[in-house]
Image (cartoon, rainbow, N blue to C red):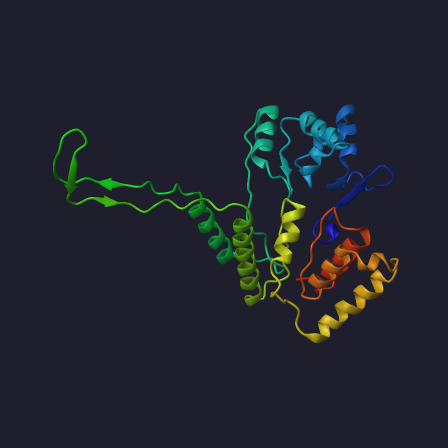
């Protein structure tokens, strides 16, 4: 794929070395760290380093390799860091800036481009407005006092003219109410993408539990084109899961993923069985998971 865009492409891993002197070289962070340790001569020719899946900096085993690559990188080499799963990207950017003594620019769009390479401006604006509205401070209760007449001793009794009490601030949503509201918004966005013929789409959720809650919370959302496509999904899943023991085929996870897939919806996270994740990936690649 890279050779279709670039004239000179190479790959270096622990086992493979193809065209290592190319203009664009894809390598593991372990190889890059070794080059930095040795102060390899080829480092002088590096113009930019792009770290894909930079959230691996938090990996218990490989994270130190990513950290050392960032720390040891020559100060004049720009770095671009990509990830869809760094919730504390601001803190991470601050650390990189302090470590390298450089300005770090961050960009976290709420929506990615659709399958046709077109950014969904309308959906982005809708979510942006909703977030701004949710973050806006609640209006304080205001009371305008007019002129009053009263009489009495001690605690007076009086009647005021022109008194007005402002609206009571809304209480923030919590728990189940918040999940339901977020699910409704997500379903509305998916329907908008479907109406604009911009599916399939991928939604990133930083919680396995919420990932499944969102998916299961849309029981009436059906994104498949009809019975013919539904039949293809059914046959594929039946053949895939036939490799499992009969008792395992009745696992709640299998039943839930099957029910979702028959409506064109998929979930994908580390808590799924490998065969389930692979089935979801294949259905997505074939266009049956929307």
Q: Is residue 229 visible?
A: yes
Counting from the top left corner in percent of width and height, residue 246 is at 87, 60
Quadrant of the rendered structure where residue 153 is? top left
Query: Nearest the camera: 25 or 244?
Result: 244
Q: Is residue 285 visible?
A: no
Image quarter for residue 165? top left
Taking the spot 69% from the left edge, 41% from the top edge, the residue there is: 53
Can you say which quadrant of the picture contains the C terminus?
Answer: bottom right
Residue 220 in which image quadrant: bottom right
Instruction: Name the side, left or right, on which 194 lies relative to 4.
Output: left
User: Where in the figure is residue 4, as x and y percent of width and height?
Assistant: 72, 54
Residue with the most extreme front position: 153
> Measuring 66% from the left and 47% from the top, which residue is drawn there?
209
Nearest the viewer among 148 and 80 is 148
Q: Is residue 36 above or below residue 139?
A: above
Q: Position of residue 119 (x, y in %)?
A: 55, 55
Q: Nearer the viewer, residue 17 or 101?
A: 101
Picture coordinates of residue 196, whole percent (x, y) = 55, 66
Q: Is residue 249 left or right of residue 228?
A: right
* On screen, residue 201 above or below 128: below
Please state the total of marks drawn on the protein image.
0
Along the viewing direction, whichever of 215 and 124 lies nearer the viewer: 215
Q: Is residue 245 left or right of residue 2?
A: right
Vertical comparison of 260 with 205: above or below:
below
């Amino acid at each position: 794929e890279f050779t279709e865009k670039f004239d000179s492409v190479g790959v270096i891993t622990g086992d493979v070395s193809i065209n290592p002197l190319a203009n664009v070289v894809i390598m593991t962070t372990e190889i890059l760290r070794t080059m930095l340790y040795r102060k390899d001569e080829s480092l002088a020719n590096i113009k930019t380093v792009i770290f894909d899946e930079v959230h691996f900096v938090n990996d218990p085993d490989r994270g130190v390799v990513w950290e050392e690559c960032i720390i040891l990188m020559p100060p004049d080499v720009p770095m671009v860091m990509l990830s869809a799963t760094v919730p504390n990207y601001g803190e991470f950017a601050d650390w990189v800036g302090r470590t390298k003594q450089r300005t770090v620019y961050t960009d976290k769009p709420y929506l990615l481009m659709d399958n046709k390479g077109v950014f969904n401006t309308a959906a982005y604006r809708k979510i942006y407005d909703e977030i701004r509205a949710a973050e806006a401070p609640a209006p304080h209760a205001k009371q305008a006092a007019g002129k009053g007449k009263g009489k009495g001793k001690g605690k007076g009794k009086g009647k005021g003219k022109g008194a007005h009490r402002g609206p009571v601030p809304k209480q923030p949503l919590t728990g189940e109410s918040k999940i339901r509201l977020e699910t409704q918004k997500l379903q509305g966005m998916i329907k908008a993408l479907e109406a604009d013929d911009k599916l399939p789409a991928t939604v990133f959720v930083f919680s396995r539990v919420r990932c499944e809650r969102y998916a299961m919370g849309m029981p009436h959302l059906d994104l498949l084109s009809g019975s013919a496509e539904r039949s293809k999904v059914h046959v594929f899943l039946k053949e895939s899961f036939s490799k499992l023991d009969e008792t395992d085929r009745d696992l709640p996870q299998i039943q839930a993923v099957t029910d979702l897939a028959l409506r064109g919806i998929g979930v994908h996270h580390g808590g799924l069985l490998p065969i389930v994740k692979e089935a979801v990936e294949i259905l997505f690649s074939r266009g049956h998971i929307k």
